[in-house]
Amino acid sequence: MTIVEIIRAFGRDLPVGIVITDASIERPGPTIVYANSAFGHLVGRDLNEIIGQTPRFMQGKETRRATLDAFHHALRVGERFHGFLTNYRADGTKYRAEIDCRPLSNVLGKVEGFIAFEREVVRRIGRPFETHGGRYGAVSTSNDLLGDALRGLGVFSSSEADLRPLEPKEIL
């Protein structure tokens, strides 16, 4: 069973958007090889429109270049990226996305793709924050068991202990 098949089996109904791409980060890549229905809902597109596209389709005029550069650098060196981007839905409405993207490495340690967990967030008003993550709150939350497993893996966490690539065996 491949990692894509495992994610497809367990991530299909997860309320967090999941996207798997190939490892090609230079334009026109990366190419989306899998997306769950939550991701399709988040971006306002049918899954058949998403597969084979690059995640760049969500970018627009308010998507910050500096954040995209940091994202690209993390992918290029095979590291995790955790950050916030302004993205756009198919109808042109913008939204703030929290993205936790990690390399998927084979048993030899070679990066074969990337998996990104994405959710919509809103800015918290009047709350002090120590990190960018404290500035935003998820639009919706879930109490399902798979969500607990993702939290256990440090998805959407900014602690130093969680800043590492996600190994395929950890998704199980």
Image (cartoon, helix red, strand yellow):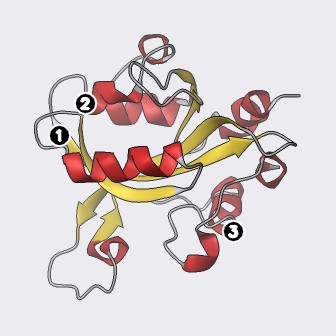
The picture places residue 126, in percent across and down from the top left corner, at: 15, 84
Mark 1 closeness class: few <14, some 14–19, many ≥20 residues within 10 Å: some
Q: Which residue matches tag 3?
A: 152
Residue 97 seen anywhere in this rendered image of the structure: no
Q: Please, what secondary structure does the residue beneath circle 3 have?
A: helix
Q: Please, what secondary structure does the residue beneath circle 1 have?
A: strand
All told, the count of numbered labels is: 3
The picture places residue 169, in percent across and down from the top left corner, at: 84, 50
The picture places residue 75, in percent across and down from the top left corner, at: 51, 45
- Residue 139 is tagged as none
Mark 3 closeness class: few <14, some 14–19, many ≥20 residues within 10 Å: few
**Residue 118 vs residue 89: left or right?**
right
* Mark 3 → mark 2, Cα distance in angstroms: 29 Å
The residue depicted at 29 percent of the width and 68 percent of the height is 136
Q: Which residue matches tag 1?
A: 94
Residue 92: quarter of image:
top left
Residue 165 to residue 42: above or below: below
